[in-house]
Structures are given as C-alpha cells and as structure tokens.
Image (cartoon, grey):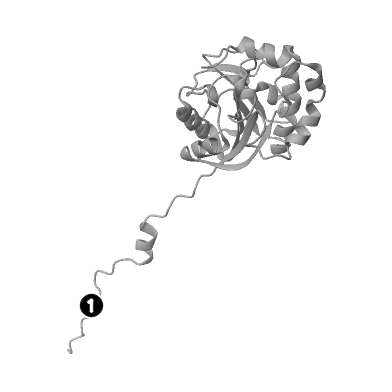
Amino acid sequence: MHLDVLDLKNFYYRSSLGRAVQRAMLPQVLEFWPEAKGHTVAGFGFAVPLLRPYLEQARRVIGLMPGPQGVMPWPAGMPNVSVLCEETLWPLETGVVDKLVLLHALEASDRPGELLKESFRVLGPGGRALFIVPNRAGLWSRRDKTPYGFGHPYSLSQLENQLRTCGFVPERHRAALFFPPSERRFWLRSSKFWERTGRRLPSFLAGGVLMVEASKQVHAPTRTGLPEAVRHPLRILEGVTKPEAKPV
C-alpha cells in the first residue's frame, strides 16, 4: 500500500525528522553515484528528494510517481519533471535510463516482481539501479510515525535474492539511518555522529534502511550454427572421381 504523496511531502520537506533523513541519505547516494553527466536519471516512488543533486549535470531527470500514491510538481521553482504513472507500466522507452532510484516503492508494492521487471526494462545495458527499502532488523520499520514503518521491510538476503530472480546483479550495499526515528532535539542534532558510527557496523545489525545497488547485465547473444556451417560448407561432389580424357 502506497502512502499519500502529501504525507510524504510533509515528512521530507516540512518536518525536522524528514530533513534529517535527507541529510543522512543524500551523501550515501552520492557515494554510489558521484556524478551523472550526460546520463538519464529516473526515480520511482517518492525518490525526488534524492535526485536533486543530478538536476544540473544529468542530461535528463525524471520523477515517476505511482497512481495510488499521487503526484506533486517537482522541483519547486523549476520546470516540472515529475509524472504520474502506472506502477508497472512506465511511460519510458526500453533501455533509456542510465541510473534509477527506487524509494518508498518496492516495500509498498502489491506486485514487487512486476515492478522489478519494469525497472529492468527501462534500464539500458550496464545501467544501475539503487533500491532503498526499510531494514526489517532496524528500528525505523517498527515505528509507523515515519514512512519507513509501512509496507513490507526486507532483510539484505531477501532483497538481493529477489533482485537476482528478476535478472539484476547486486553490486554493492550499505545501510543508513542509524539514529532513532525521533523528533527530539538531542537525536536530531547528533544524527551525523550516529551515521558516521553506524557505518562501521554490519548493515544487517543496524540501520533503518538498506541500500542495494544492482546492475543490468545483458549477455551477448550466443552464436548460431550458421558460421560453423559456412566455415565448413558441404561438398556435394566429394568422392566423385575426375573424368579422364579419352584418346582421340
């Protein structure tokens, strides 16, 4: 079940906790992808807070928002790049996306397998996707006061296995949101400290969200038997003796 876009907007842009979440996650995303010059960058779900660093350098940025969630214009004060779409039928051509971010998407979907197939379809060969989901072992998935307390949380092995099933190749992973989901000033002010400390711990032990980068690898088509057949053509007249010239 997708949350309403207004609830997500209010959390990320109008609450102190939501802004702290952005400050914690944006550096992680930029460590995965420091630049996107000339690339097409897309986000699905409510990924737009993490796409802002690529607006100036990417060839194109697209914010896809599912129908059950609703859509909002984004970014503020600039030409709109967000679009409302079907969850498993995006208005994008096959293979046009270089980088794809999914946030508040996979855990909220009733058809996660179909959603992953659509994600795979729009990525070009060698394209990369970043899947961000609530960590089932973390504290954030147990508190419904934030968007991370809704939907189906994942363990790292569950997410990576599901990605492999749909053709993705998991490349790297890490966790984020090591500070508690609390509006108290102490936790908000010390959030940077907890993020630095938490990154030294195994991701399955701590962290409110899991971030898994996966790539789309397209194998070269296997050769048919035709080249081999041409290399060794049939010799129909093999074994037939040459005619001898008769004396006149």
Q: Closest to the observer: 71 or 19?
A: 19
Name the residue located 58 percent from the left edge and 11 percent from the top edge. Answer: 4
- For label 1, the crowd category at 10 Å Cα-Cα, with few meaning under 14, some 14 to 19 and many 20 or more, is few
Q: Which one is in front, 243 or 33?
A: 33
Q: Position of residue 47 (x, y in %)?
A: 64, 23
Viewer-proximal residue among 144 and 35: 144
Residue beneath disc 1? 239
Whether 71 is drawn above or below 111: the answer is above
Residue in the picture at 73% in, 35% down? 198
Q: Is residue 133 left or right of residue 112?
A: right
Image quadrant holding the C terminus, namely bottom left
Q: Residue at x 63, y 11 (%)?
A: 7
Q: Relative to 246, does residue 194 appear above or below in the rendering?
A: above
Locate residue 209: give its quadrant: top right
> Residue type at mark 1?
Gly
Q: Position of residue 155 (x, y in %)?
A: 56, 34
Residue 21 percent coordinates (x, y)? 72, 23
Describe residue 220's horizontal placement relative to residue 12 as left or right: left
User: Residue 89 in the image: x percent, y percent?
Assistant: 48, 23
